[in-house]
Image (spheres, rainbow, N blue to C red):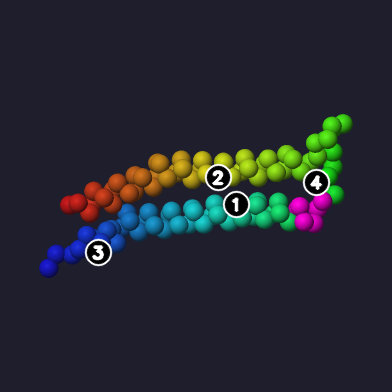
Amino acid sequence: METSLAERIAADPNYQTLITTRSRFGWSLTIAMLIVYYGFILLIAFGKNLLAIPLGSGVTTLGIPIGFGVIVFTIVVTAIYVRRANSEFDTLSEKVRQEALK
C-alpha cells in the first residue's frame, strides 16, 4: 500500500529540519521581543525617574528614544525573520515539496 502524502512529508528529513529550525528560531525571536517589550513596560512602571531625564534643553525626555528603540527593535526582528524565512526556510520548503511530489 502506498503511503499518503502527509506521511511522506512527515517522514522527510528536510521537513523535520524545517520544523525544528523554524520553531527554535521563532521562539528565540519571540523571547527576545518579550524581554524588550516587558522590560520597557517594567521601566515605565518602576523607573519613571530614569525615563523623565531630559535630553538637552528641550522637552524631550529619555523615554522617547527608548520607546522609539522598542519600535525599531520590532521592525528589525521582523526583518531578520523575513530574511531567514525567504532564504533558508523557503529553500527547505521547496525541497520538501519536491520530495513529496516524487
* Residue designated by label 3: 7
Count of number-bearing discs: 4
In the picture, the quarter occupied by the N terminus is bottom left
Q: Which label was assigned to residue 77?
A: 2
Of label 1 and label 2, which has the lower sequence position? 1
Could you say whether the residue bearing mark 4 is in a helix, strand or loop? Answer: helix
* Closer mark to the observer between disc 3 and disc 4: 4
Residue under the point 37% across and 54% down: 18
Residue under the point 61% across and 55% down: 34
* Residue designated by label 1: 33
Which amino acid, mark 3?
Glu
Residue under the point 74% across and 40% down: 64
Q: Are marks 1 and 3 in contact (CB under 8 Å)?
A: no
Of label 3 and label 4, which has the lower sequence position? 3
- Please indicate whether residue 14 sits to the left or right of residue 98 in the image: right
* Closer mark to the observer between disc 4 and disc 1: 4
Majority secondary structure in the magenta region:
helix
Q: What is the crowding at mark 4: few (fewer than 14 residues within 10 Å), some, or many (at least 20)?
A: some
Spatial CA distance of label 4 from label 1 is: 20 Å
Spatial CA distance of label 3 from label 2 is: 34 Å
Which amino acid, mark 4?
Leu
- Please indicate whether residue 61 sits to the left or right of residue 36 in the image: right
Q: Which label was assigned to residue 51?
A: 4
**Outermost residue toward the front in this view:** 59
Which amino acid, mark 2?
Val
Spatial CA distance of label 3 from label 4 is: 55 Å
Could you say whether the residue bearing mark 2 is in a helix, strand or loop? Answer: helix
Q: Quadrant of residue 90?
A: top left
Q: x%, y% of residue 28?
A: 54, 55
Of label 1 and label 3, which has the lower sequence position? 3
Q: Quadrant of residue 57?
A: top right
**Outermost residue toward the bottom in this view:** 1
